[in-house]
Amino acid sequence: MSRLAVPKTYKLFIGGAFPRSESGRTYEVVKADGAFLANAAKASRKDARDAIVAARGAVAGWAGATAYNRGQVLYRVAEVLEGRRAQFVAEIEDAEGVSRAVAGAQVDEAIDRWVWYAGWADKFAQVAGNANPVAGPYFNISVPEPTGVVAIVAPQDSSLVGLVSAIAPALVAGNSVVVVASERFPLSAISLAEVLATSDVPKGVVNVLTGSPAEIAPWLASHADVNALDLVGAGDLDWIELEFQAADTLKRVLRPEQGPDAAAPSLERIRAFTETKTVWHTKSLR
Amino acid sequence: MAGTTLVTARERALAVLGGDPDDATLRRYLHGIPGVDAVGLEQRAAALGTRSIKTSSKAWALDKIISLIDLTTLEGADTPGKVRSLVAKAMNPDPSDPSTPRVAAVCVYGDMVPYAVEALGAAHGDPDDGAISVAAVATAFPSGRSSLEIKLADTAEAVAAGADEIDMVIDRGAFLAGRYGLVFDQIAAVKEACRRPDGTSASLKVILETGELVTYDNVRRASWLSILAGGDFIKTSTGKVQPAATLPVTLLMLEVVRDWHRLTGHRVGVKPAGGIRSSKDAIKYLVTVAETVGEEWLVPHLFRFGASSLLNDVLLQRQKLATGHYSGADYVTID
Amino acid sequence: MSFLEYAPAPESRAILSLRDSYGLFIDGEFVAGRGTPFQTISPSSEERIAEIADANEQDVADAVAAARRAYDRVWSRMSGRDRGKYLFRIARLVQERARELAVAESLDNGKPIKESRDVDVPLVAAWFFYYAGWADKLDHAGLGADPRALGVAAQVIPWNFPLLMLAWKIAPALAAGNTVVLKPAETTPLTALLFAEILQQADLPPGVVNIVTGAGDTGAALVAHPDVDKVAFTGSTAVGRAIAKQIAGTHKKATLELGGKAANIVFDDAPVDQAIEGIVNGIFFNQGHVCCAGSRLLVQESIHDEVVDRLKSRLSTLRLGDPLDKNTDIGAINSREQLERIRTLSDIGEAEGAERWSVPCEMPENGFWFAPTIFTGVETSHRIAREEVFGPVLSVLSFRTPQEAIAKANNTPYGLSAGIWSDKGSRILAVADQLRAGVIWANTFNRFDPASPFGGFKESGYGREGGRHGLGAYLAPAAIGGRTAAPRAIERTDASAEASVAATKPKARARRAAAAKKGAAK
């Protein structure tokens, strides 16, 4: 006896909600063997704009939360991910056409990376900041602060681990994120959005767009209210043009990385989306 | 020089304070004045200290310094002879150069006033007119630790003996304990004791002893308090406590005097005392006065140096300017 | 006479023995440039100081080649300890020749001698001392063990702090093991060339530092050179933007230290006398030719009038004139071009309805001068409240609450610096937290120290100079997957970002490079 399955409609994730693309467009996502898998929303420039507005609105709250709180929220994401491990494994098997073991390894790595980054939330400032022994009667300290809104073109050759590796480091320091998922493997991105939506991550802190990176990324790169651009997964796009556009508002840009080790976990990825703020204050007993 | 009368001083204080000068009212007022950032104050003073005063400006400055000096001896070992010697130096600082100006005043203990008055003879008078005043320290100088009665008697005696100026000390203990009303009342009472039978009054310099007040906020509050209570001058130090006068403290007091003038139109004098030994340092003070309250403050009734060894250094510098070569200690007199 | 009209106290120029003309400093030697030489003049008198060589593209290529050779053969192989010793030597030589350098700087730049003598040159020496000690401690720079130098650094510096900006650039670059080609500003090349003589005295290996003089084209050629690995630029946001475009799609890393429109926020409980000094120092230091200048004064409305009154009386004591006079507070504007810009923006301020007040002072006949000026009644929408004037012009705005102060302070595409004046610690820290600026001075302003990172948020650029962070800007981690990596992270293969760059669309790159070059030519 086989039961008729209830398929999921995959939508965008903007400002904590799951809207369809305002354009009404979808595109076919297929399995490795070419068979139909699902229709994913094909985000438009207006969806990108809405996502940036949502992300900007979320910056103050997320950046202003205590680092301890951010760490807890991020760890909670890992917990919920772990709970839905089977769903992600199945999705990846389907989408990437890999064995259960390989898909499982990807999900495990994604969860572990997420945990690794979550742990940095309340330590990063201690490692990246310091007191400065200036030659004068001043208290002087440098601390890293979030850059603001980070737009990301996620690694295109993986469903989950690439996405996680790009999002998590930006979130650690308190940035909010607009991410364009892998065009070929977008379904795990939307499932991850469901995890984020149920893990105490404030609305708008992460916004997920599916569709064509080639179409959406230029709008993100040229948007004046985006502070940083992570092109880690943009290697196959005209990414030089994207970096060129980003220069109009002096966005911080991470260039594409390719290969299995793209976006490998590192402190540098956290640091890339922070600004060092140095505060001087006079000191005297008199 | 005539001090302001007690009545107008008190009326002015009441108008500014908006109430009786008791502890609570004074506290509200003094603690409502903007604070002082020590680092910024000291940097401003240091910057003023880098002014380079050369040639004609330096010549003017050296003469001006001499004319603003309260030539001082405040030793347990003071004798009539020592005071006469000091007065002789005050009247004729450089025997080799009659163009040398006289100092503004001689400053002595109260019991030495008669000898100073006698030695000055016809030269005794208002330094704004080129004469020399007699200033007496009073009020249980330097600690100020005695009863009000004794402080007032100390003052009255000096005034009666011919002192033109009284350098009183505030009760630092009372100030630090927050008893601003008591400090106010004592200053006001001493001011009253400065009156002469003819209705005129000796000028009152109020010594804050900034080295014991320690913080700039305290100095600023004590300055306001002293001015409100009727002081004609605010003075940094007795010279018996270290640190005595410093440039930042003097700058701060000048800022208070400037603000008081803005508020009331009334001018109060400032006297840094103790620790100013070189012409170079003294010129820094002149610069600080000129750039903070204006050049018009560089007159004897608005600015003084309390000093003893400073005079000889100025004379040496003066000789250098006149002759073009450096002078030596044996070419100025020791008193 | 008035005492306040202090008699002239000129610093002696006799200490300077300048050549009549200066070549480019390439591979340890002064060589002729292939471009047309130009004159450097004193902005306070417009008199000629010396003839300066102009480096064309070929000269720049020579310089980069020399830097590459020095990197490959000498500097990258030298121990950190020895690199540090060279930097210590340089620091000492700067101290020994401090007065000479200060006089040259004031002559060429127009800044008061008291600033070049007491601020610029001492900081130059301090910068070399600070980074000298880092050269053999790179493992502690914050990038993990065995970080590597980037290679050849192209450094383009502005005219406002000519020698100090040189130190900010060269000291960390050399400490980290890079070699350098530096281009000083067209109007202020003199001290960089004297510095080249210091490098010769220090016996620094040839090619480790090369100095190419010239105008915008020289800088653009340097930034564009394919064998450059790192670009460090201080200057306008417009040129910074052009540079960011120029290096898009390359392997080059960049540190950009650009413009600013800093808010100096004065709360009603501020230590007012020190705040006045901070406002003055904030905007009139170095004639306001300071990217982090406190050009927007935000005063709490309740004390607005009092602060403006006090400020005006304080400004009346400022002394404008001969930069070499030790009592000068305000020197000359650096160039006719800059003077025109200041005049234009000030006229616009007046036309927009702000009230203009300038210190009444006598201007010298020759040279470029602008009296310290305050605009009151400035609104956030006025151009003088938004655009960088880079001159002695202060815009005064008011606010009512801390929230409003923060909102107004942050309402700019810039984010370099800010000032906060208040007696209340909790408020200072909370405001500092929310200001989007890289350097925040509380109850002080315009303080600099080699140990303290400096640099901006947003369009004020990226990267930091100074401190450990400034060192990191000239280093790359040994490899991702080192000790900062997460458990089970896969070992990095060969697919570094840099490797992937080379393969990408060379035609598109050439097209964009051409477009960027146009922008950079200014």
Image: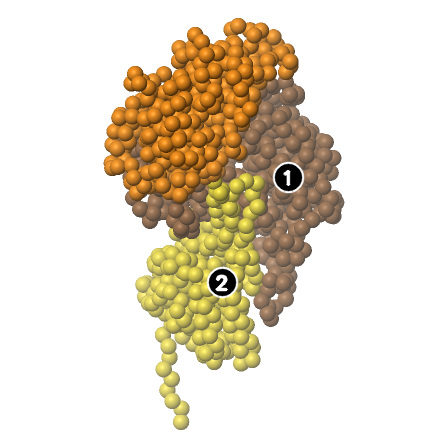
Residue C88 at what x, y percent from top left? 69, 39
Q: How many marks?
A: 2
Please tell me whether residue B199 is drawn above or below residue C27 in the rendered image. Answer: above
Please tell me whether residue B96 is drawn above or below residue B265 in the rendered image. Answer: above
The residue at which mark 1 appears reads as C128
**Residue ID at (46%, 22%):** B111
Q: Which chain is orange?
A: B
The residue at which mark 2 appears reads as A121
**Residue ID at (56%, 21%):** B309
Q: Which chain is yellow?
A: A
Residue B94 at what x, y percent from top left? 55, 10
- Tag 2: Cα neighbours inside 10 Å, few (<14), some, or many (≥20)? many
Dots 2, 1 in contact, CB < 8 A: no
Snapshot quadrant of residue A259: bottom right
Task: Give the amino acid at mark 2.
Answer: Ala
Alpha carbon of mark 2 to alpha carbon of mark 1: how far?
A: 35 Å
Residue C175 at what x, y percent from top left? 66, 45
Q: Which chain is brown?
A: C
Please tell me whether residue A241 is drawn above or below residue C313 in the rendered image. Answer: below
Q: Which mark is residue B270?
A: none
